[in-house]
Amino acid sequence: MKQFLISTLLVLMTCGAALAEPTADGKALTVRTYQFKYKDADKAAAAIKALMSAEGSLSIQPSANSLVVTDHPDNLKQIAAALAAFDAPAQAFKLTVRLISAAKMEGTPRVPTELQDVAPKLAMLRYNSFEDLGTIEVESHEGEPGLVDMPTGYRADFRVGEYDPSSDSVKVNDFRLSKLQGAHKDELTQLLKTSLNLKLGQTVILGASKASGSQRALMLVIVAKR
């Protein structure tokens, strides 16, 4: 019977939970192991650092794609919930990009009907005349690349990064806007390259011009949604 009890305790220790040594204030720490199916353990470690106590510690196990976390039981409850939300299948997002030619002109501003919703924001950049160069909407998943050509001769390519539930935002890495040129539209001239952290549903406006103070600019209006 005693041998059976010892064996049972050993099995429990390998299942992900164990008691560690008490801290200086007498409060015991607990050790838990979390294995990830969809996300990387090193990224999971970064996601929970803010939830850990001063006495807590963690260890990344790359070969098993797992994380060993030592902390107070109350902290581990929050950490477990955060990691469960973190280790989710790649989510899909829709990225809408509107391309607008903007100019600073004297006289009556030219604002097409389809651009009246963004004209006030563009006017804050001192532009008052606009031309719609097209809108694209592309769906991509976390970690996947996206590429789309506009009928007006522009190309946008990017890679969707990870979704951050704490800020309800998604990263868009290496977003590039290029102009298709040449007789066969097979030459690319890069106009803009950046990486963005887009809060879902929020409008972000980027501009590219030949020089500071230019009277004309190419504006991008970008929105990310589920």
Image (spheres, grey):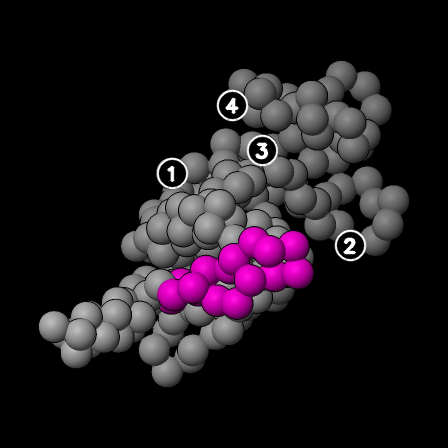
- Image position of 206 with respect to 64: above or below: above
Which mark is first along the chain, 1 or 2?
Answer: 2
Quarter the N terminus occupies: bottom left
Say which of 210 and 143 sits in front. Answer: 143
Which residue reaches farthest right?
213
Whether 94 is among the magenta residues is no
Q: Is residue 133 visible?
A: no
Crowdedness of circle 2 by 10 Å Cα count: few (<14), some, many (20+)? few
* Label 2 sits on residue: 210
The x, y position of residue 73, in whole percent, is 46, 50
Is residue 30 a member of the stretch shown in magenta? yes
- What amino acid does circle 4 point to? Glu
Q: Amino acid at mark 3?
A: Thr
SS at mark 1?
A: loop
First of labels 4, 2 by sequence position: 4
Q: Earlier in the sequence, mark 3 or mark 4?
A: 4
- State the separation of the CA atoms marked 2 and 3: 24 Å
Q: CA distance from mark 4 to mark 2?
A: 26 Å
Placement of 17 over or under 214, stated as above or below: below
Relative to 119, is 171 above or below?
below
Between the residue at mark 1 and the residue at mark 4, the CA separation in whole angstroms equals 23 Å
Is 157 placed left or right of 37 in the picture? right
Q: Are marks 1 and 3 in contact (CB under 8 Å)?
A: no
Indicate which disc, 1 or 3, sits on the residue closer to the N terminus.
Answer: 3
| Label 1–label 4 contact, CB within 8 A | no
Q: Nearer the viewer, mark 2 or mark 1?
A: 1
Distance from label 3 to label 4 (Cα)? 16 Å
Residue 50 x, y percent position in the rendering: 61, 52
